[in-house]
Image: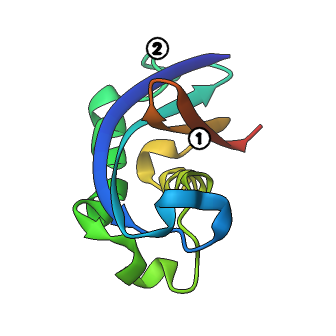
Amino acid sequence: MYSVTVRDHVLVAHSLPRPLFGPAQSLHGATYVVEATFRRDQLTADGVVVDIGAALSALGDVLDPLRYRNLDEHPDFAGVLTSTEVLAGWVGERLARSDAAAGMDGIEVTLRESPEAWVTYRSGR
């Protein structure tokens, strides 16, 4: 299996109003480094997994509606706790529907909250 990974970042605000989240229960900011990995069993006729520019553009298009937004007010997250896991799934599902993901055998999205903590979501095989 071959893979290509691209990276971007997104700054958001949100709250996680449950005791489990301790001080993150209050409104706070978060900066996520977002990595998207495109996987394919076989290379295309052009000898690539995906055009890197198209992959970067697709990731940016998925992240744009989140940039500098309060996720507590975002319609897609009404009544949803926007944990890092939830956000990784949201990004992954949208990325999997992008033109850049057509024909892929899998998409993997990793949100890095810090150098010590990250969450990964996988779609496909």
Q: Distance between the residues labelled 1 and 2?
A: 14 Å
Q: Please tell me which of labels 1 and 2 falls first in the chain.
A: 2
> Which residue corresponds to the image point at 55% horizontal and 51% vertical from the top-left?
88
Verify CB contact (< 8 Å) between mark 1 and mark 2: no
Q: In this view, does 96 lie to the left or right of 114?
A: right
- Nearest the viewer among 41 and 87 is 87
Badge 1 crowding class, 10 Å Cα cut-off, few under 14, some 14 to 19, many 20 or more, is: some
Residue 123 vertical placement versus 93 (above, below):
above
Badge 2 crowding class, 10 Å Cα cut-off, few under 14, some 14 to 19, many 20 or more, is: few
Marks counted in the figure total 2
Q: Which amino acid type corresponds to the residue marked 2 in the rendered image?
A: Gly
Figure quadrant of residue 53: top left
Residue 12 vertical placement versus 74 (above, below):
above
Indicate the position of residue 114 as horizontal and vertical percent values: 44, 32
Q: Which amino acid type corresponds to the residue marked 1 in the rendered image?
A: Gly
Q: How is the image coloured?
A: rainbow
Name the residue that disc number 2 marks: 47
> Which residue corresponds to the image point at 68% horizontal and 16% vertical from the top-left?
1
- Visible in this render: residue 86? no
Indicate the position of residue 36 as horizontal and vertical percent values: 47, 35
Indicate the quadrant containing the C terminus: top left, top right, bottom left or bottom right. Answer: top right
> Which residue corresponds to the image point at 31% horizontal and 59% vertical from the top-left?
12
Q: Is residue 14 left or right of residue 53?
A: right
Label number found at residue 103: 1
- Nearest the viewer among 58 and 18 is 18
Q: Residue furthest left?
A: 68
